Amino acid sequence: MREETLTRALNRYDQSPHLVFWETTKACSLACRHCRASAQTEALPGELTTQEGFNLIDQIADLEGPAPILVFTGGDCFAREDLSELISYARGRSIRLGIAPSVTERLTRERMEEIFALGVRSVSISLDGSNATSHDSLRGIPGHFEKTLEALRMMRDMGFRLQVNTTVMKGNALELAEIFGLLNDVGVSIWEVFFLVGVGRGVQIQEVDAEVAEDICHFLVDTTTYGMTVRTVEAPFYRRVQSERAEFGRADARDHFALGDTYQALRTGLDGLSLDADRDPRSTTLATGDGRGIVFVGYDGDVHASGFLPISLGNIRAESLGSIYTQNDLLTTLRAGLLDGECGRCDYRRLCGGSRARAYARTGRVLEDDPSCVRTKAGRRIPLPVL
């Protein structure tokens, strides 16, 4: 990302976020082992009402600067009986929308036709394994893997712009090349890769270590040469890797960057797909981070820097989202890049900034180093087995 483009983006994020995620409900019929939200089968007391949802949408529309994108998430946003009303109201306020439903009995062709008719074109759903064994074990529902692929094909044929979210952890890291192959076969062109942070039910699952995360980021850059748009969540160091690779070019990266066995295994899997790489690696991600261009509104109106950082910054029932976003001390500190340790001294602190959620989960301090980055002292290798 060019310096002037980066500066322009960061200045814009001082005024308003690029993305607002609204956890419309905690209700979801899945029981995912890594769920950030610790979702429940039923909605929790205190959930924003329809009118309060309208008020939140008004607050988003009234933000200074370019209007952000509003993403309805959860839990399962389809568990909200008033979702269509909320979408219609947001469309009436000229807000760009995306939805992130769970693949459950609620995700039907009829429901998606209704959503499409309301003007929604962007949908993201999760795929966390390359086969039924790994995916279904995480989702807690037998047959969920096939249902997810069926849902993707259905929505593709309906004309939706599809994004697949994959949460990376030790148990599935070596499946990423196969998952990429599945996405390519289905026709998905946007892959958002979540690097697990131990919050919610995810505290029971192991994150990948820093060296493996670095290998994965280089592999993800490789996939962009096949036309895939890659974004990461809680792995802003991916943008550093993108920048380093852009300077290096298209030659074999393993020796130059001293990459490990995980990269070699994933690269071998990618080569085995026999696809044509027809372009240079693409840099398409924005310089967003926790509280910097991103803000998360919980089911009860509490505002957070991200869905993985469980510190309440205020509540939209008592204060406007714009006021919280622009004036909260923690958020202004994050946007100023006033970080501690090596993250605060890093040449890439404006482009990256580290995962504040992971720093908090590991150390209890939001401004501390991101332990999943190889540039920090906390980054260390615990090798994964090679396929």
Image (cartoon, helix red, strand yellow):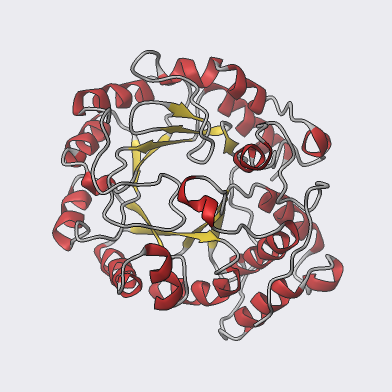
Left or right placement of residue 263 versus residue 9 in this view = right
Left or right placement of residue 369 versus residue 329 in this view = right
Assign the N terminus to one quadrant of the image.
top right
Q: Residue at x 36, y 13 (%)?
A: 318
Assign the C terminus to one quadrant of the image.
bottom right
Residue 115: give x, y in percent of width and height: 21, 49
Q: Which residue is drawn at 30% across and 46% down?
A: 40
Is 42 rendered above or below residue 242? above
Residue lying furthest left = 110
Residue 151 occupies which quadrant of the picture? Answer: bottom left
Residue 26: give x, y in percent of width and height: 31, 42
Marks counted in the figure total 0
Residue 64: give x, y in percent of width and height: 46, 19
Residue 360 occupies which quadrant of the picture? Answer: top right
Is 233 rendered above or below residue 189? above
Q: Which residue is drawn at 52% across and 72% down?
A: 180
Is 146 rendered above or below residue 373? below
Residue lying furthest front = 204
Is 363 rendered above or below residue 300? below
Left or right placement of residue 151 versus residue 166 in this view = left
Left or right placement of residue 375 versus residue 49 in this view = right
Residue 336: give x, y in percent of width and height: 69, 24
